[in-house]
Amino acid sequence: MQKPHMYSIAGYDPNDPYIFRTPTLDDGKSIWKLVKDTQVLDLNSSYSYLLWADQFSDTSILVEDHGKIVGFISGFIQPKAQDTLFIWQVAVDESARGQRLASRMLQAILQSQSCRNIRYLEATVTPSNIPSTKLFKGLARDLQTECTITDGYTEDQFPREGHEAEELFRIGPF
C-alpha cells in the first residue's frame, strides 16, 4: 500500500478539521464516487481514477474530513511544457463547499516539492462553470500574476453533442 504524503500548508491552523494529502491507489474508488456525486463534472471510468491516484499522486491532492474524502484535484506536469501544471478536475463535496477548499488545495499543490519548477498553471473551464472561473481568477489574484483566457477545445471536438466548449485558463508566471 502506498503511503500518502501530507501536504504542508502555509498558514496552517491546527484546529482545521481538514487533512490535505496526496491520493493513494486505495483512494481511487472514493475519488470516483466524489466526482460522480458532484453531478457537474464529467465522470470518467473508475479505472481512470485508480490510475490517477496511483500514477499522478505527486501532482494531485485530496482533502479528508474525519476520514471522508471531501475534496480532490487531479493535476499533471505537462510533458511538452515542464514548467506548467495542468489541472484536470476539481471536486469538492457539497458538505465542504464554502470553505475555500479548492483554492487551498491549489495553493498546497503549488507549494509542494513536486511543483518546485512550476511557473504556470493551466486548466480548461466551460463558460457556464462560474465557480471554476472564480477559482482560477482568484488564484491569479492571490498569486499576484496574470490569468489569460483563450480558446481551449471547441464543441465540435467533443464526441457527444451538447458538450460546451472549454476555455483555456493560463495563470502565471509565478
Image (cartoon, grey):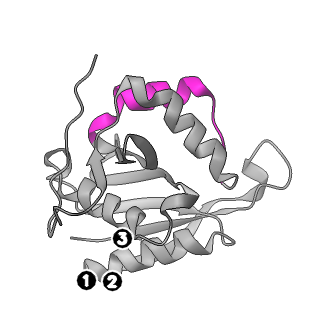
- Residue 128 vs 17, above or below: the answer is below
Amino acid bearing label 2: Arg
Residue 24: image location, x then y, percent:
34, 29
| Nearest to the observer: residue 68 or residue 140 | 68
- Residue at 16 percent across and 53 percent down: it is 117
Apparent side of residue 144 relative to residue 103 in the rendered image (left or right) = left
Three-letter amino acid code of the residue under disc 3:
Ile
Tell whether 100 sits left or right of 18. right
Q: Spatial distance from mark 1 to mark 2, Cα to Cα?
A: 5 Å
Residue placed under numbered mark 1 in the picture: 144
Task: Give yes or no for residue 47 being in the magenta stretch.
Answer: yes
Q: Quadrant of residue 155?
A: bottom right
Q: Which residue range is magenta in the image?
A: 41-58
Q: Is residue 50 above or below residue 39?
A: above
Compared across the picture, whether 9 is left or right of 55 comes to left
Q: Please tell me which of labels 2 and 3 falls first in the chain.
A: 2
Q: How much space separates mark 2 and mark 3, taking CA atoms?
A: 10 Å
**Residue 68 picture location, percent across and down:** 44, 42
Query: In the rendering, at what x and y percent does residue 168 appear?
Result: 52, 64
Q: Mark 3 highlights which residue?
A: 171
Mark 3, Cα crowd under 10 Å, few <14 / some 14-19 / many 20+, is many
Secondary element at image label 2:
helix
Q: Earlier in the sequence, mark 1 or mark 3?
A: 1
